[in-house]
Amino acid sequence: MEDAGIGWIAAIIIGGIAGWLAEQFMKSNMGVLMNILLGIVGAIVANAILGVFGVALGGWIGYLIAGFIGACILIAIGRAIRR
């Protein structure tokens, strides 16, 4: 997060937006706190996965994209575990 030049407050805001977008895309129903957590943790997960392939996303837009991708992955994993 610090490498991307994103502060904690911005990470919470961007994580919330990314989590909300993923929630809408995946047709899931979660609260605001879960959206923020999904966006932040999703960005960490997606950056780790993309780092394996040599892709680096930086800045606000990169963090938003990574958060969205990671949150979608986490929602899919959560659905698979519940079944």
Image: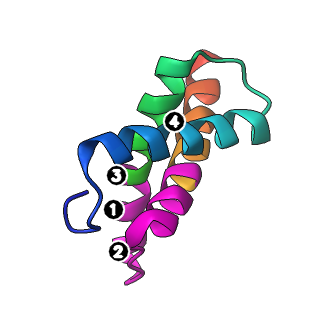
Compare marks 3 and 2 and give the one earlier in the sequence: 3
Name which quarter of the figure residue 13 lies in. top left
Q: Which quadrant of the figure contains the N terminus? A: bottom left
- Amino acid at dot 3: Ile
Mark 1 and mark 4 lie on one chain; the one further toward the N terminus is 4
Corner quadrant of residue 29: top right
Q: Residue at x 48, y 34 (%)?
A: 38
Cα distance in 3D space between marks 2 and 1:
7 Å
Asked if the stretch drawn in magenta spans residue 53, the answer is yes
Q: Could you tell me if the residues under marks 2 and 1 are in contact, i.e. CB atoms within 8 Å?
A: yes
- Relative to 3, 62 lies left or right: right
- Who comes first in sequence, dot 4 or dot 3? 4
Marks 2, 4: nearer the viewer: 4
Q: State the residue at coordinates (51%, 36%).
A: 16
Query: Dot 1 lies on which element?
Result: helix
Q: Does any portion of residue 39 appear in the rendered image? A: no
Q: Is residue 50 visible?
A: yes
Please, is residue 7 above or below residue 58 in the view? above
Question: Disc 3 designates what residue?
Answer: 44
18 displayed left or right of 58: right
Which secondary structure, mark 2? helix
Could you give the CA–CA distance between mark 1 and mark 4, rounded to whole angstroms?
20 Å
Q: Position of residue 60 (x, y in %)?
A: 45, 64
Up the image or down, 70 lies above or below 37; here it is: below
The residue that label 1 is drawn on is: 48
Q: What is the span of residues highlighted in magenta in the rendered image?
A: 44-68
Q: Identify the residue shown where x is 77% and y is 42%.
A: 25
Q: Which residue is mark 4?
A: 16
Q: Secondary structure at mark 4?
A: helix
What residue does disc 2 label?
A: 52
Say whether disc 2 or disc 4 marks the residue closer to the N-terminus. 4
